[in-house]
Image: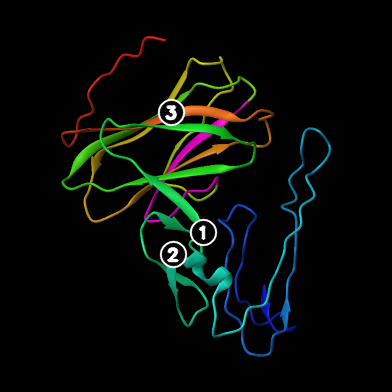
Amino acid sequence: MYDGTDVSSVVSTLSGDMLTPYVVQVSSRKDVLISFEADGTEHSTGSTLQLGFNATFIDGNSCYNDCSGQGSCESTGKCTCDEKSYLADDCSVVARQLTDDNTLEITNLPPGEWEYFYFELTSNKGWLVDLQDEGDASSDPYLMGRVNAAPRLYYKNYAAWLDWYYDRTDIHYIRNVNGVTGVTYYVGVANYKDRATENFDGSITLRLSAPGTLGVRVWIL
């Protein structure tokens, strides 16, 4: 994306994997040039997925979607969200809080969609987040984590790339045996659209332990 119609002034380089809406500040000329390119990847099917985008101009004194009523508007046109549970540049994406040994349910997550969670540590501990696939075998969940920001397929610090395996028997996890205080850990579950044909149902649990250790757990399925 270029500020104005001159390609010498790059405002931002974006990808389709970014959490949207994504806000970019440009000059008062209200002209931008957007170059939209595919990645050039050759797919085994011989075809590529053709995508588009929407771009909206917003007055410099306001923010997109008025921060969803969940944040304050800054001069950059982006929002400062009121809570760490609010994500995206308009605070419209809500993450649920994970606490130790408390299981949260995920229901009817459509192909291509995400659900977000977060947690913070009150002392340095080892942590493990496990995701149990309880849904249709034709759903394909991915589990990812990121520090201080929402994870995406190509923006993450932790990932459990899940095999498309047996219905109701998959347990997958991300972990850090030396988790620290002072940061927010965000966890994302994506029902991977390239392979999923059904909604995803499952459960997610945070488990904490002493630093440097993670207790052995056995699941009977």
Q: Earlier in the sequence, mark 3 or mark 1?
A: 1
Three-letter residue code for mark 2: Gln
- Gap in angstroms between the C-alphas marked 1 and 2: 8 Å
- Gap in angstroms between the C-alphas marked 2 and 3: 27 Å
Name the residue at the top extreme: 220
Residue located 21% across and 51% down the image = 181
Residue located 57% across and 68% down the image = 65
Q: Secondary structure at mark 1?
A: loop
Magenta stretch contains residue 145? yes
Residue located 81% across and 33% down the image = 45
Residue located 35% across and 14% down the image = 219
Of the pair 166 and 162, the residue shown nearer to us: 166
- Which residue has dot 2 on it? 70
- Which residue has dot 3 on it? 203
Do the numbered discs 1 and 2 sit on residues whose CB atoms are within 8 Å?
A: yes
Three-letter residue code for mark 1: Ser
Q: Relative to residue 196, is residue 118 depicted above or below?
A: below
Magenta part of the protein: which range? 139-153
Question: Which quadrant holds the C terminus?
Answer: top left
Q: Position of residue 197 (x, y in %)?
A: 69, 29
Three-letter residue code for mark 3: Ser
Name the side, left or right, on which 103 lies relative to 189.
left
- Which residue has dot 1 on it? 92
Q: Position of residue 185 (x, y in %)?
A: 34, 48
Q: Secondary structure at mark 2?
A: loop
Q: Secondary structure at mark 3?
A: strand
